[in-house]
Amino acid sequence: MTDKGAEKPADKPAAARKRKAKVQEATPPKPRFLRRLAGWVLRGLAGVAALYAFLVLAFAVVPPPINFYQLGEVWRLGSIDKDWVSWEEIAPVMGRSAVAAEDANFCNHWGFDMAAIRQAIEEGSNRGASTISQQVVKNVFLWHGRSYLRKAMEAVLTPVVELVWSKERILEVYLNVAEFDEGVFGVQAAAQHHFGVDARDLTALQAARLAAVLPDPQNRSASEPSSFVRSRTRAIISGAETIAADGRSACFEG
């Protein structure tokens, strides 16, 4: 009796170890695939961020060759008309007209016009809320559409572009990639297409006509203006004169 009783205390730890071993055998090991997947995702995001950082730095000095929307138009139309010109080859009134038409506070914001965004929300519309800087980011680095992913990427990239590029460079790129008629991209191609002149020789009226079609270039014409385009042209001419007088064009004309 004494011998059996003496063995029991020694047997309890051994039994506990056996039960623990059985539990461990029944519990599957943590899957390594999830950790690897998380690593791949993080490396992929880091790669995308590095690529965009490189492009932002490169396009601060080098003309963007082509963008996703232009590639789509090449596929759809067969070809497009585009011709890059430097800021010095664009009539100053063209810059003022574009800013007056699309983003009158261009010189006063860091990429987002919060007053315009609040007004658009109050009116239940997004018209007028997108700045020239946002449009440049969308046209150069992203794609057209209303997806949450594109909007999120635009929100991240816009302040970066504002930080790295000058206002003059942002407007220069904008005027060189904007569509002014179906398949016609950039102010030089547009000036030749609509008026038979170079971008440097645009008059105030011609520049305002081109700026007037920017929101809807495939349904508006600068050379054959509708009554709406004529009315908008007059407003843009007045707006361009105003921002020149009150200093809101100083950031790209200084």
Image: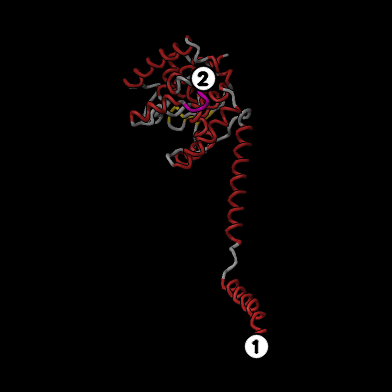
Residue 22, picture quadrant: bottom right
Q: Position of residue 227 (x, y in %)?
A: 31, 20
Left/right placement of residue 144 relative to residue 65 reads: left
Report the magenta residues as a range. 107-112
Give x and y (percent) for residue 49: 60, 41
Front: mark 1 or 2: 1
Q: Secondary structure at mark 2?
A: helix
Q: Residue furthest left?
A: 227
Mark number displayed over residue 117? none
Residue 217 image offset from top left, x and y in percent: 41, 28
Bin the neighbour count of mark 2 within 10 Å (Cα to Cα): few under 14, some 14-19, many 20 and up: some
Residue at image coords 38%, 16%? 235
**Residue 118 lies in what quarter of the image?**
top left
Q: Classify 3 as above or below 138.
A: below
Which circle's residue, 1 or 2, is located before the other in the chain? 1
Q: Nearer the viewer, residue 194 or 59?
A: 59
Q: Is the residue 87 above or below the residue 50 in the image?
A: above
Amino acid on which the number 2 mark rests in the picture: Cys
204 displayed left or right of 160 = left
Q: Which mark is residue 4?
A: 1
Q: Which colour scheme appears in the figure?
A: secondary structure
Q: Nearer the viewer, residue 202 or 164?
A: 164
* Residue placed under numbered mark 2 in the picture: 107
Whether residue 139 is situated above or below residue 201 in the rendered picture: below
Magenta stretch contains residue 63 = no
